[in-house]
Image (cartoon, rainbow, N blue to C red):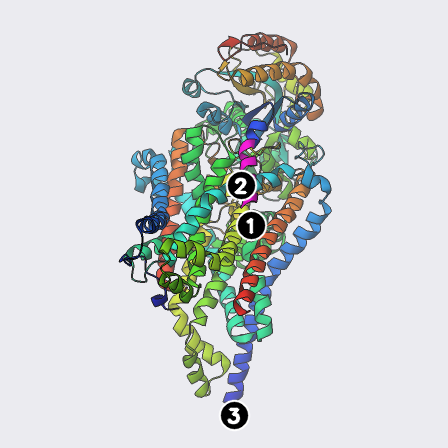
Amino acid sequence: MSMAHTAPLAMSGAPPRRAGSVRTGDRLWRLFLLAAGCGVFLLTALILIVLARLALPVLHQPGTWAFLTSSDWDPVAESFGALPFVWGTLVTSAVAVVLAFPVGLGVALFITEVAPTWLRRPVTFAIELLSAVPSVVYGLWGLFIVVPWLRETVEPALGAALGFLPLFSGPPLGLGYLAAGLVLAVMVLPTLASVSIEVMRTVPAGLRESAYALGATQWEVVRLAVLPHSRSGLVGALVLGTGRALGETMAVAMLIGNAPSVGTSLFAPGYSLASVIANEFAEAGSDAHVGALAALGLVLFLVTIAFNAAARLLIGRRQP
Amino acid sequence: MKAALSRRVRSAAAFLLTALCVVIALVPLLSLAWLVVSRGWAGFSWALLTEVPGPPGGAPGGVGNALAGTGVVVFWAALLGLPLGIGAGVFLAESDHDDRLASAVRFTADVLAGVPSIVAGIVAYGLIVAPMKRFSALAGAVALAVLMLPALARTTEELVRRVPGALREGGLALGIPQWKTSLRIVLPAAAAGIATAVLLSIARIAGETGPLLFTSLNNAHWSLAPDQPIGTLTVQLYNDAISPYPAMQQRAWATALLLLVVVGLLNMAARVVAGRRAEGAHG
Amino acid sequence: MRMFTVCTLSLVAAPLLAAGTLITGAGATFPYPLYARWFSDYGKARAEVQFNYQSIGSGGGIQQVTRGTVDFGATDAPMTDDELTRAPGILHVPTVLGAVAVVHNTPVKDLRLSGAVLASIFLGTVTRWNDPAIAALNPGTALPSSAITVAHRADGSGTTAIFTDYLARVSPEWLKSVGRGKAVKWPTGLGGKGNDGVTALVKQAPGAIGYVELAYANQNALPVVALQNRAGVFVRPTLASTTAAAAGVTLPGDFRVSITDADGKDAYPVAAFTYLLIHADNPDTAKGTALARFLWWAIHDGQKVAPSLDYAPLPAPVVARVEERIRQLKAGGKAVVLEP
């Protein structure tokens, strides 16, 4: 849609017929819109200020770098380090994206390239349904279905086959990085799939047609025309999906095992930034503890902001 | 000839693989849906909707107060979030494409849309709970309002932009002031779209748990008061899910079913409204 | 639009119409089953007052009552002197006695452990159920060779404070490397939220060991460990062995006392008083009065339901002391009127 049709806000040269009250009305209306628009900045500033005010004492005392690299989380001794939580957040998100990205890509290809037209809508709808399920319901499902399955079937099998790798060593607990990552994978799948679909739809029809004209099979069209053209957008989908996974709270809190340690095995219990805040914020025993949790929140906020900004730049301005 | 055949086989295999991906994606959905429906239905009763949760080890009672509580928190969140979110959306829609300020707002809104919900909880704690010295439904609502605002603004923008420019130009050409054109012509034309956006954003925040844990806390009794702690479906579900009592776990599944029904109805309503708009555009 | 206005008005008006006093409390999960029952029973008989108690952990209870975000707190571990200086005017009122049961998920019946071996398990140095140290305490019992999964609390908890206080008393190594507190730096294991969460973890994971309030263990039919007390006797947590732990203790004036690793051959070594934290002078007369009346009810009528939920009633001398304390409470600057 061309913007020429939209009356620009900046257009202030009023026709001479307008009465004073009309001009006041316009001015007030524009002022309201401007305020609402700038409210978004205000909100960002507010988030930063509230987090920083709570977190500053902690970031000041041991220093930001010390806070980020210490693996010591000891509320009794008031010694706080962010490493176990940063680690757990990264590991679970990585597991989620590694598992979900190929599947998401496949789903997107199926919907855009393979499925007959009548099948596209129901499949898209089903994938969208996955994103409508609340996090806490995923947690419930993970706790009673995924965890026992991992503990009794998957982890013993993985341990038997690949137990020599540190990644798959240790007793099968069910709860841990793997459980949280697996359920996260299901949760970020719709994001990955829908952004990928959006990106693939922007592939110019001409590009496809010329590939077909050269005698390419359907798969070769995908490989030689669709995928290369969508590459940056797909990376954007990956980054956006990672951003979503980083901030997920409830399902992770219910499945990761809540142990503030830096585990090297996927079977080990860990903790994530969002889930430690969910568990400890209401009951933090001291101002330093609250401050440390707010500092974790600040870290989480800045990291997700960075991921979202990067994703948005990679996917490009979406056409309204 | 043989090469062509193998190329075609490879193509078919690749596409079979994509179909397999769809199956893999649907397995968790079906498993989750089946369990929530079958286990939830077993715990479903009239009492679930009308009673308050019973003490651990006793009769399970229900989550009626939490259902009402979710309504209260979402209501206040909408009251706070809608004017600003829709206003920001209209601001974006009415702005020029090369408007630097609008681009910055749009970018910020996109980035904010991905803010983890738990962070919104900390903000609401710092803004409302700490100064008021009390957990409250309102604090939970503030957290949810923060969460709904950015996405609502962007969706509203997209839907308002779809209003035919001719409508707006017509209004302006008739000498109707811009604010009246916006309020009386453009917004009504976009109303169905905005309603869709509103319903979708409400569906999203109704399922939030994390930020409510330390803002609206929980309440085992009936309460509609905005300045008191309040029970919500999601927090009740979380507490019941991690409890060791079979009766409470049963209640968690039933609550999950109830929550999915609520969220599903909101999504369906959004679809109906959006569908009606599409029909209107054609007819 | 009119619907909208009506809705808004009714929601705004709702708090004004709500009758009576709503009292919010938060804290310990340890006595939660009992408190839930108490508030339910007490509230049924009195429409004018409602209690909303959230079991968020003792650490949270202390924190929130200090900040004034709740009307009363609840904790199993007495507040430290440091915490008390930050919360002027907060009093401890013991309500019942409870025991922390060590529960496990193995087929072994009547498992016996000493404090030192229990500490080794939670330190992560004893990692298999058939470890010689465990076998030595359980002669003639077939022990599985499976790995031990430690389950502990992920939140600030009085149950943890009682448990670690016990371990610190019986194991110098525990005292040195971990210490005691509502939340400690666990050397190993899975974290669960609340007594609920730990019970659920132990129930779910074969080979798990954890510590929970006795009521949670019994109501979920989890096997409990008999612990060796100071007298060298292996004692299972029961109401009688919990009461026995409190028998030899002299209560200080502010009621803050630890009764872990108590003397006496019948005493279970991981027992404790659990407390409500209330304002000596609640600025809100209605709330202060309602709380004082509730406390009076709790230490008399309330005690009768305690045993059915696996909490040991307060010994009579303690009840007398608490009565005296309740009579001294004030609300709105004036002495409370206990009779309605």
Circles 3 and 2 on the same subunit: no
Identify the chain of the residue marked 1, using the numbered disc in the image. A
**Quarter occupied by the C terminus of chain A:** bottom left
Identify the mark at residue A134; answer none if there is no mark: 1
**Quarter occupied by the N terminus of chain A:** bottom left
Residue B235, visible in the rendered structure: no
Q: Which amino acid does the dot numbered 2 rest on? A: Thr
Q: Residue at x 61, y 14 (%)?
A: C293
Identify the chain of the residue marked 3, using the numbered disc in the image. B
Magenta segment range?
Answer: C1-13
- Above or below, comparing residue A200 to residue C237 in the picture: below
Q: Label 2, on which residue?
A: C5
Is C19 contained in the magenta span? no
Q: Label 3, on which residue?
A: B1
Circles 1 and 2 on the same subunit: no
Identify the chain of the residue marked 2, using the numbered disc in the image. C
Is C6 contained in the magenta span? yes
